[in-house]
Amino acid sequence: MSDMNLRNKPVVRDPLERSRDFGEVCLGFTPQAAALEAQRCLGCKAAPCMKGCPVGVQIPRFIACLKDGDVAKAKAVILKDSSLPSVCGRVCPQENQCEKLCVRAVKGQPVAIGLLERFVADNAQIQGVAAKKTGKRVAVVGSGPAGLACAGDLIRAGVDVTVFEAFHKLGGVLVYGIPEFRLPKALVEKEVAELAQLGVTFEKDVVVGKTVELSELAEQYDAVFVGTGAGLPMFMNIPGENLNGVFSANEYLTRVNLMKAYLADSDTPVFKSKKAVVVGAGNVAMDGARTALRMGAEVSVVYRRGREEMPARAEEIEHAEEEGVELKLLSNPVRINGENGFVKSVTCIKMELGEPDASGRRSPVAVDGSEFDIECDMVLMALGTSPNPLLTSSCKALATGRRGVIEVDESLETSLKGVYAGGDAVTGSATVIRAMGQGKKAAASILQSFENNR
Ligand SMILES: Cc1cc2nc3c(=O)[nH]c(=O)nc-3n(C[C@H](O)[C@H](O)[C@H](O)COP(=O)(O)OP(=O)(O)OC[C@H]3O[C@@H](n4cnc5c(N)ncnc54)[C@H](O)[C@@H]3O)c2cc1C
Ligand code: SF4
């Protein structure tokens, strides 16, 4: 392979040092590495990489600006399609999206599109400009990526926007799910501050469906966007799940991230595990495992399929292993064992991969008589989430589908006229960029409906 077939490397902190604190693990490209990496982009006319990006960021165009040394212009190009580039550059599963389709990947390694996007976003300051006021008012429920993207596009189009958030912090999963060592919270605060500067009003500690009804918002505003995410964790329904020391990974991460349980003087401390088992293999499982490790535990991740099938970002799996997380693949918990009401061990059974299932993935089959125990004092369940039914159960007119997702039409309008929805609340747990894409699509539909009714 010639050097141009290999990607330039970002600065990554030493595993031993970083696994003891919550500081960011990957520090991104140096200016020199970013310039060299930009040179690897072939500037393909057909731009297959763009087809892999759920919001169609103009990748060759922004990289061309970077080649010219114009970082501000590069950021302006990205912002046309993505409102949170410093976030997406860090957390998008690029290997399955834009980078998967990069022509360079045929003979070597794809251009590091995510790292370049992050470099541009972190190194250019651009002030957005709000358009002339239209007199229209929209309520956005939830301040995750879907809500923020929707609010951003609407305010820039001259619409007055108020975001209602249940928590005391803004940003959704970006602040209470994804840990500081992967996504510094200051970045999310900066994105939120930019929206506030443009004129978006944020109302925190408002639970729509409790503090105020969705129907009231629908009456008071010209349109409503619901981006309430999918925060309800699933469990395995195996014996022992009620023992002390069994948590959903989402709850554990929220306590550590949002309530800062890692600080010595935190008033919401978490259980300090010595030996933890994490069940699952997605981003939530990896974040739970690496957080427990930083809180002082030895950690094993138990997953019923093989490495190839692990849904987490490749980089997170690599980083977790470097830091000392042990992967126990093709293993499935069947029972959690306790002593005096507290977790003592998990009994697992070995699995082997059988025929492909409906999803095309080979389904795991239990191997008879292969049970084994893993000693532990904490179990984190990271098996996926579904939308919290609080809002939908308080507003029966809002049609829902399988696992409680909100039903929408092509324009993302719900069964309630003028009420739109998007993000995890509609798709079930997915990705930041997909949620953002839906927030933007809903904003476009809302603007179109205003235009149609003029
Ligand atoms: C631990 C973890 C790690 C992840 N890692 C990645 C990753 O690396 N890459 C990636 O692309 N994706 C990742 N994801 C998934 C991604 O974060 C989500 O797909 C995305 O945040 C969904 O955005 P959203 O705006 O739809 O919902 P959310 O981010 O969930 O935001 C919804 C917001 O609505 C608020 N809300 C809920 N109900 C109400 C109500 N009734 N009234 C008012 N407010 C309400 C919530 O408090 C929340 O702030 C991860 C998820 C988790 C949990
Ligand atoms: S937003 Fe995500 S998928 Fe799109 S170009 Fe950026 S890193 Fe790739």
Image (cartoon, rainbow, N blue to C red):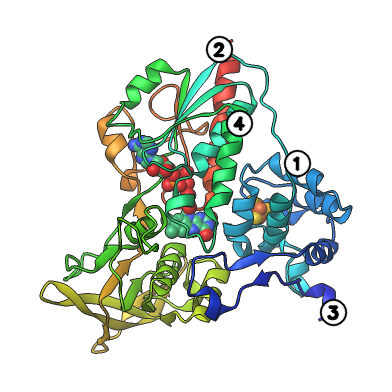
**Labels 1 and 4: the sequence-earlier one:** 1
Which residue does the numbered mark 3 point to in the structure image? Answer: 2
Residue 107 disc label: none
**Labels 2 and 1: the sequence-earlier one:** 1
Amino acid type, label 1: Ala
Mark 1 or 4, which is nearer the eye? 4
Q: Residue at x 51, y 41 (%)?
A: 146
Quadrant where the image shows the C terminus: top right
Q: CA distance from mark 4 to mark 2?
A: 29 Å
Q: Quadrant of residue 302?
A: bottom left
* Depicted 34 relative to depicted 335: above or below: above
Residues tagged 1 and 3 counted as in contact (Cβ below 8 A): no
Indicate the secondary structure of the residue bearing disc 2: loop
Mark 4 or 3, which is nearer the eye? 4
Q: Residue at x 56, y 70 (%)?
A: 314
Indicate the secondary structure of the residue bearing disc 4: helix
Q: How many marks overall?
A: 4
Q: Residues within 10 Å of mark 4 (few under 14, many from 20)?
A: some
* Depicted 149 relative to depicted 243: above or below: above
Quadrant where the image shows the N terminus: bottom right
Residue 112 located left or right of residue 254 = right
Which residue does the numbered mark 4 point to in the structure image? Answer: 197
Which residue does the numbered mark 2 point to in the structure image? Answer: 453
**Labels 4 and 3: the sequence-earlier one:** 3
**Labels 2 and 3: the sequence-earlier one:** 3
Amino acid type, label 3: Ser
Which residue does the numbered mark 1 point to in the structure image? Answer: 76
Which residue is more in the foreground, 333 or 189? Answer: 189
User: Where's residue 136, x and y in %?
Assistant: 54, 16
Residues tagged 2 and 3 counted as in contact (Cβ below 8 A): no
Q: CA distance from mark 2 to mark 1?
A: 31 Å
Amino acid type, label 4: Gln
